[in-house]
Every structure is written in C-alpha cells, then in structure tokens.
Image (cartoon, rainbow, N blue to C red):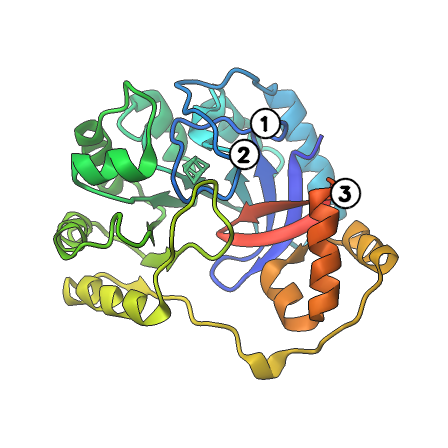
Amino acid sequence: MDIIFGPVQSRRFGESLGVDLSPKLKQCNYDCLYCELEGKKAQESMREVLSVDEILEAIKQGLEKFPNVESLTITANGEPTLYPHLYELMLRLEDIKGDKQTLLLTNGALLWDLCVARACLLFDKVKFSLDAVSERVFKKIDRAYKSVDLAQILKGIYQFSADFKGELYAEILFVKGVNDNPQEIQEMARFLAPMPLKRLDISTIDRPPAYKVESLSLEELERIGQVFLHYKIPTFVPKRKQGSMQENLQLSQDEILKTLALRPMSESDINMLWSMESKKILESLIEIGKVKQKSINGVNFYALR
Ligand code: SF4
C-alpha cells in the first residue's frame, strides 16, 4: 500500500516525504469542482481507516530509505483531518521523526472541532485552503458534505490561526466564473488579513479537474494577487515555466517505467525535461493504470502504481 510517497522537491517546503492517510480511495468531506482526484460524493467521516501502527511503520521505512528529507507532509487522497487517530499519530510520530518538520495539508473544514484542532496544533506547518467566504460561492465550489457549516469553518480557521504556534499557510484556488468575483476576493482578503500567515498561495486549475471548469490566466491571477497584497497579506502567485529550459528527452515506454520505478518525478520536472512524445506515452501509461498521479505540497508528481 502506498502510504509513503516521494520524496518531492518543492520550492516552497524543500524536500519532503508524503504520507497518505487514505492511500486506497478518495475520502473527503468536500467534492470540489477543481479536485484533481476523481469526483466523489462528499462524506462526513473516513470509512476505511489505517491503523496508527501501520502508518508509523511505513514512515519509519520511508525515513530509512530517504534519510535526508527535510519534512514529512501529512496528506490524503481526500482530507487528512478525517483520519480519526490523527492526534495519536502525531504524538507517536515524535518518537521516530527525529529532526524532520511536519506539514499538514488540509481543506480547513474541521479546524473548529477541538479534537481535530488539538492534533493540528502539533504540526510544525499547516497549510489550509479557502475557496470562498460566502455561502453561495462555497456551496458552488466546494460541494461539502451536507452537515458542513461555512460559518463554523471560518470561525474554526480563525481560532486555529490564533492558537497555532507553527508556520501557517493558506491557499486559494481560483476557478473562472465561480470564486473570482471582485466582492468575494475582497471578502476573502478581509477574512485572511488579521491572520499571522507566513504566506498565501493563489493558484488556478492547471490539470484536468474532476468537473468541467475553467482556469484563470496568469494576468488575472496577478491582478487578484494585488488585492491580497493591498491587505498586506504575503501573497505568492506562481510563474509559468521557462520554455528555454526544455531539454526534450526522448524516452520509450520502458525507459519511462524504469525512471519512475527509481523515483517519482514531479510534473514540473517532466514538463522541463521530457519531449512531447514522452509525455504522450506517460498519458497512455496513466490511462492503462500503470502510472498514477499524486499531489504533495501542491506539487503534482508521477509514480508507478
Ligand atoms: S480538492 Fe481537496 S478538499 Fe477538494 S475534494 Fe479534492 S481532496 Fe477534497
């Protein structure tokens, strides 16, 4: 079972080993329009739950294999805070993680829950996502489980931001015509402005999502970024890759499989290094289920299934 993923090199968080708390299937309390996993009805809780022992054993082996990673990123096929033993996992992780930093990627929907918040407070870094602050837009974009209450989520994020002693990051993903209206953007900026954010990442769809939605242009993202900067929020807008850095590596199917067997590769590395033909072969390997995609620290990468 692929509990451990990577390591992945991220400009933002360094080299990190991914820990997937739901490696077999998507389990999420949202069903976001832009999700890169398959669309699936939101659920209130995790139905398939790994044991803490199983996860710790996988982390131990991962750290033995990759002793130089800087951090462990706790994530999931879905939402990691649905994992019911997160607090126990974090307490016991202390015994094996050595000097590795811990990072949590969450949709933030459960930070109001004291049991969840208690576990999240044990991380060194937490990155939460926020897609809307108005009920209408939230319903449209995040399509949360029916008992999920936006006012409670916002209160939870706010309270967590005040209590958390580690580094706090936020991310907003913009979808054209859904959460990019000026009023929603202003309200999101007002909501985030008082928080001690280390950084806000704003982004848009850059892979085929679960549902048919459109991305924004880089210029539009840059304009939106200005609104958040106006509120003195440290905001990062991703830049496109340089075409001049293309290396155009021509790989056969066998070579691709061997390369990915040795080490998963990030999408940006593949874009930079591989030829169009090699990328087409990669797509066909994904289609027939030999290669899978995964997102860690906001970085997409590819590995053997
Ligand atoms: S984008 Fe994240 S929060 Fe949204 S449905 Fe997918 S896994 Fe869940």
Q: Position of residue 158 (x, y in %)?
A: 20, 39
**Which residue, given by chain and number where applicable, does mark 2 sit on?**
77
Q: Residue furthest top?
A: 47
Q: Name which residue type carries label 3.
A: Lys
Residue nearer the viewer, 180 or 158: 180
* Residue that badge 1 annotates: 25
Quadrant where ligand 1 appears: top left
Of callouts 1 and 3, the N-terminal one: 1
Question: Residue, x 50% and y 28% (percent of image)?
Answer: 91
**Residue at screen point 84% across, 62% down:** 252
- How far, Cα to Cα, is label 1 from label 3? 17 Å
Label 2 with label 1: CB-CB less than 8 Å: yes
Q: Amino acid at mark 2?
A: Asn
Which residue, given by chain and number where applicable, does mark 3 sit on? 290
SS under mark 2: loop
What residue is at 87 percent from the left and 56 percent from the top? 254
Q: Is mark 2 within 8 Å of ligand 1?
A: yes
Q: How many marks?
A: 3
Between 112 and 38, the one nearer to me in the picture: 38
Residue at x 75%, y 64% (from the top left corner): 278
Q: Could you say whether the residue bearing mark 1 is in a helix, strand or loop? A: loop
Q: Is residue 148 visible?
A: yes
**Quadrant position of residue 266:** bottom right
Number of other residues with Cα within 10 Å of mark 1, as a class: few under 14, some 14 to 19, many 20 or more? some
The answer to which of marks 2 and 1 sits earlier in the sequence is 1
Residue farthest along the right direction in this orientation: 254
The type of residue carrying mark 1 is Leu
Foreground pick, 197 / 186: 186
